[in-house]
Image: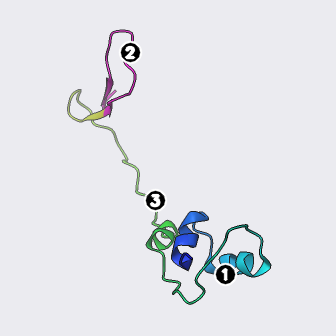
C-alpha cells in the first residue's frame, strides 16, 4: 500500500479531498492507500499557487550600438544540423 503523498504525486497533484473521494467511491482500479498515512503539504503545489506582480518594462532602449546585447545559447541538441552543428546562439542588440 502506498501513502497519500505518493498517490497525490501520481495523480498529477490532485487535492487530498479529491483523492479521498476517488478512494471511497472506488473509481480507480488498484488504488490501494494506507489511510493512516499523513497528508503533508506539497511544496510543488504551494509554489505553483504563488503569484508576483509583473516586472516594470524598460521605458527606453539604449541609444548606442553594442551598449547592451542579449545573448541566448540553445543546445546541445540530439540531432545535428546540415552543417553538423548542435548548438544555436542568438545575439540581439538592444539599440536596434
Earlier along the polypeptide chain: callout 3 or callout 1? 1
Kindly identify which numbered label has been placed on residue 17: 1
Q: Helix, strand or loop at disc 1?
A: helix
Distance between the alpha carbons at the discs numbered 1 and 2 = 50 Å
Q: Quadrant of residue 75?
A: top left
Q: Nearer the viewer, residue 41 or 69?
A: 41
Would you say residue 94 sits in the magenta stretch? yes
Q: Quadrant of the N terminus?
A: bottom right
How would you rate the neighbour count of disc 2 (Cα within 10 Å): few for under 14, some for 14-19, many for 20 or more? Answer: few
Distance between the alpha carbons at the discs numbered 3 and 1 = 32 Å
The residue most toward the bottom is 36
Q: Quadrant of residue 63?
A: top left
Q: Residue at x 51, y 87 (%)?
A: 38
Q: Helix, strand or loop at disc 3?
A: loop
Left or right? Give the position of 66 relative to 59.
left
Circle 2 residue? 81
Earlier along the polypeptide chain: callout 2 or callout 3? 3
* Vertical relation: 11 (above or below) 4: above
Left or right? Give the position of 39 relative to 19.
left
The percent position of residue 13, horizontal first and vertical second, equals 57, 68
Left or right? Give the position of 1 relative to 89.
right
Write down the region rendered in magenta: 73-96
Give the mark toward the camera: 2 or 3.
2
Circle 3 residue? 54
Tell me whether the residue at label 2 lies in contact with that at label 3, contact meaning CB atoms closer than 8 angstroms.
no
Amino acid at each position: 500500500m502506498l501513502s497519500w503523498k505518493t498517490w497525490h504525486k501520481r495523480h498529477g497533484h490532485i487535492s487530498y479531498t479529491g483523492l479521498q473521494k476517488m478512494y471511497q467511491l472506488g473509481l480507480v482500479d488498484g488504488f490501494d492507500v494506507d489511510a493512516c498515512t499523513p497528508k503533508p503539504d506539497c511544496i510543488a503545489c504551494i509554489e505553483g499557487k504563488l503569484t508576483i506582480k509583473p516586472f516594470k518594462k524598460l521605458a527606453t532602449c539604449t541609444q548606442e550600438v553594442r551598449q547592451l546585447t542579449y545573448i541566448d545559447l540553445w543546445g546541445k541538441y540530439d540531432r545535428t544540423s546540415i552543417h553538423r552543428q548542435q548548438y544555436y546562439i542568438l545575439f540581439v542588440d538592444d539599440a536596434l
